[in-house]
Image: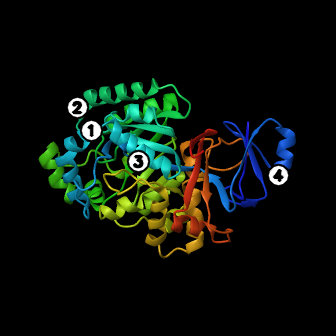
Amino acid sequence: MQIITPSYILTPNTLLSNMSVAFDRIIYKIAPLEELLKDFPNAKITKLQKNSLLMPGLINAHVHIEFSANKTELSYGDFISWLYSVIENREELINGCNDECMKKAIDSMLEGGITTFGAISSHGMDLEACANAPQNVVFFNELIGSQATMADALFGDFSARLDASKAVKRDGFYPAVAIHSPYSVHPILIKKALQKVKNENLKLTAHFMESNAERDWLDKSSGDFKEFFENLLKQNSAVSDSSEFLEHFDGHKALLTHVVKANEEELKTLCKNSHTVIHCPISNRLLGNGALDLAGLERHNIRWVCATDGLSSNYELNLFEEMKIALFMHSNMPLLDLAKKLIKSVTINASDALGLNSGEIAEGKNADMLVLDLDREPNDELAIHLILHRYNISKVYINGMLKKGN
């Protein structure tokens, strides 16, 4: 048992002072230090410096570890140009990111206070790095393939990767399923994969309505994707439209990434099925896809969380930076209100969306916690300051174990 005594605790809904936290793997009690010492007389005590802040560990719900080798290889500014550059450089990027490269990306997330991440794994090459990561990991095995003739082979490869991830036995590692997108996965494959999801109660994610190219292709089998599919895959039309795609997810809550180009009917469907939207503002900007309508999501009572995406469409895997970009991107929203929502989006809301027992400093929750060194007493605008000022993270606890600091 341990007791930690910071100056302040962000729960993340309330700021507490003159309180301490007793924990091992989970948080047992939050109370004044004197009371905790009576309940846990043999606990190890850590008293933190003045203006220290204890807050929940951050949760990055969507990241592509396998593509962490990219820095200047890919083309930015337009989605289709970026996609062609990914195809052109795919082998170099994948082969150029060995376990050391992936470990570097994972360690950078730990340095930035990310205690849990959702890894979108296209090839399974990141399995060992994620299995050995200090963080909790939701390992989304990705299914992709729009050609019916290849369905059996593609599903066999997907199933083998899923089985390999299920063989990982450690606390905080969760095998899961990712359906790449409506335009890239044949309905036959989606149905087979979702049967596994439902039978085994696996977590589920997908990319959805990221670009104008996707919108035009799914609606009219036209636009920028037409040449792409005709030349590379000999397809003249989309394998399904967006409503057909979303119907597959009925009855199973999913995390849908991007959703920048979704229409009103699609948003109503997302609300009806209690799906969560993953917002990746830097990726959306770099690929020329515009800004997600957060106010529109909130009108439809759709939960959203903030994530980094991968280094194929970002320059670092840091949620404080991602939140800062979002704070400026959504200039039509009240600043403090948005800042508070962003903090919740990478803590309690992300935890709830992934079905985890974390995301807040509360009794019974997993002890995934950060210590930030503030430079002065916090005020009512703490959420804004946390996002803007990149305070030093002096300690990171994951499941009660100190993973950064001393």
Q: Nearer the viewer, mark 1 or mark 3?
A: 3
Residue at 60 percent across and 66 percent down: it is 383
Measure the alpha-carbon separation of dots 4 and 3.
38 Å
Labelled disc at residue 145: 1
Lower sequence index among marks 2 and 4: 4
Amino acid type at circle 4 is Pro
How is the structure coloured here? rainbow
Q: Earlier in the sequence, mark 2 or mark 3?
A: 3
Q: Residues within 10 Å of mark 2 (few under 14, many from 20)?
A: few
Residue 128: x %, y % from top left: 39, 31
Q: Nearer the viewer, mark 4 or mark 1?
A: 4
* Horizontal side of residue 209 vs 344, given as left or right: left
- Residue at 55% x, 47% y is 353
Instruction: Say which residue label 3 marks.
Output: 63
On screen, 257 above or below 78? above
Q: CA distance from mark 4 to mark 1?
A: 56 Å
| SS at mark 4 in the image | loop
List the residue tagged with mark 2.
Answer: 150
Type of amino acid at the residue the image marks with label 2:
Met
Q: Quadrant of the N terminus?
A: top right
Locate residue 287, reporting x and y percent: 30, 61
The answer to whether mark 1 and mark 2 are in CB contact below 8 A is yes
In the rendered structure, are the residues bearing label 4 and label 1 in contact, judged by CB atoms less than 8 Å apart?
no
Task: Give the residue number, with chain letter if any, for mark 4.
Answer: 32
Mark yes or no: residue 222 visible. Answer: no
